Image (spheres, grey):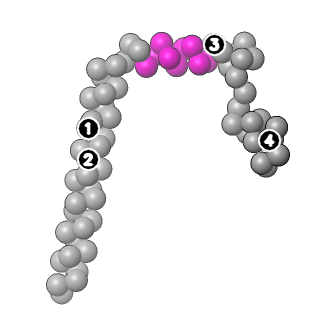
């Protein structure tokens, strides 16, 4: 019984940690929405212009596939 309580406590701590992490990520995204949107647009534009390649292409070029 004691081990079950310990396991339940560990799971509860993990869930609480996850909630805190998600809340912090949400707060970060809200605070930095404009910059994140600009970065995303730059990345998409660079990819469309052929300045960037996919991760799969990088692995293929390096012989890692």
* Quadrant assignment, res 49: top right
Report how far apart the C-alphas of labels 3 and 4 lie in the structure: 25 Å
What segment carries the magenta color?
36-45
Which quarter shows the N terminus? Answer: bottom left
Residue 31 appears at what percent x and percent y? 29, 20
* Quadrant assignment, res 52: top right
Report how far apart the C-alphas of labels 1 and 3 lie in the structure: 30 Å
What residue is shown with label 4?
Answer: 62
For the point 26% across and 56% down, the residue is 15
In the displayed image of the protein, which residue is found farthest to the bottom? 1
Residue 39 magenta-highlighted: yes
**Is 50 drawn above or below residue 5 in the view shown?**
above
- Which sits earlier in the primary sequence, circle 3 or circle 4? 3
Report how far apart the C-alphas of labels 2 and 3 lie in the structure: 34 Å
Q: Are marks 2 and 1 in contact (CB under 8 Å)?
A: yes
For the point 45% across and 16% down, the residue is 37
- Which sits earlier in the primary sequence, circle 1 or circle 3? 1
What residue is shown with label 3?
Answer: 45
Q: Which mark is residue 23?
A: 1
Report how far apart the C-alphas of labels 4 and 2 lie in the structure: 39 Å
Task: Give the number of callouts.
Answer: 4
């Amino acid at each position: 019984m004691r081990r079950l309580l310990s396991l339940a406590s560990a799971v509860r701590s993990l869930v609480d940690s996850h909630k805190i992490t998600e809340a912090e990520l949400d707060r970060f995204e809200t605070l930095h929405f404009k910059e994140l949107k600009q970065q995303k647009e730059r990345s998409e534009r660079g990819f469309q212009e052929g300045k960037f390649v996919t991760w799969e292409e990088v692995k293929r070029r390096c012989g890692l596939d």
